[in-house]
Amino acid sequence: MDEDVKKRTQEVAALYFEGVSEEKPFDLWRAFDPELGKQLSLFITGRMYGREKISHQTRQLVTVAVLTVLGRSEELKLHILAALNVGCTPRDIAEVIFQTFTYAGIPTVNMALKVLRGVLVDKGLWPLAQ
């Protein structure tokens, strides 16, 4: 195994998911197929999320936008937590969600804002200061 990819996978996973109590995708994959779970984690976390072409903040904001448009609220929660972990502000995350309105519609934006609010409540960051 490429030790650099393994190390990068561990670093990025720690960066994104430190303190996250929700089930992480790797744990779910591993429960069904340990070897495939490992390979998926190495590729997605180590090779894709570990790329240094854009910042982790940008990468997570893009991920939040895509998950919002797709209406994937459970995965969205995980990546809102990751976005906060890498230094995105709640206002930045909200703005990215609002930007999806034109393409995804207001019900989708409302769902994502509710997910964001729930995360912020859980972290003691709600209500946002004006």
Image: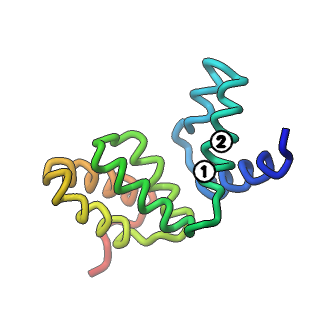
Total count of labels: 2
Report the amino acid beneath label 1. Answer: Met
From this viewpoint, which residue is outermost toward the top? 32
In depth, the one of 128 and 2 nearer the eye is 2
Task: Indicate which disc residue 7 carries.
Answer: none
The reply, left or right, for residue 40 in relation to residue 5 is left
Left or right: 112, with 39 as reference point: left
**Residue 128 occupies quadrant:** bottom left
Q: Residue at position x 13%, y 54% from top?
A: 106
Find the residue positioned furthest to the left: 106
Residue 62 is left or right of residue 111, and the answer is: right
Q: Is residue 118 above or below residue 33?
A: below
Are discs 1 and 2 less than 8 Å apart at CB?
A: yes
Q: Residue at x 85, y 38 (%)?
A: 1
Q: What is the spatial separation of the Cα atoms under label 1 and label 2, in whole angstroms?
A: 6 Å
- Name the image quarter holding residue 2: top right
Q: Nearer the viewer, residue 83 or 59?
A: 59
Q: Secondary structure at mark 2?
A: helix
Q: Amino acid at mark 2?
A: Phe
Q: Secondary structure at mark 1?
A: helix
Dot 2 crowding, Cα within 10 Å, few <14, some 14–19, many 20+: some
- Residue matched to label 2: 43
How many C-alpha atoms fall within 10 Å of the one at disc 1: few (<14), some, or many (≥20)? few
Q: Is residue 85 above or below residue 77?
A: below
129, 66: nearer the viewer: 66
Whole-percent x and y of residue 93?
37, 65
In percent of width and height, residue 19 lies at 60, 52
Please give the residue where the numbered disc 1 appears in the rendered image: 48
51 lies left or right of 128: right
User: Looking at the image, which is closer to me, 2 or 119?
Assistant: 2
Q: Is residue 91 above or below residue 65?
A: below
Residue beneath the point at 39% across and 55% down: 64
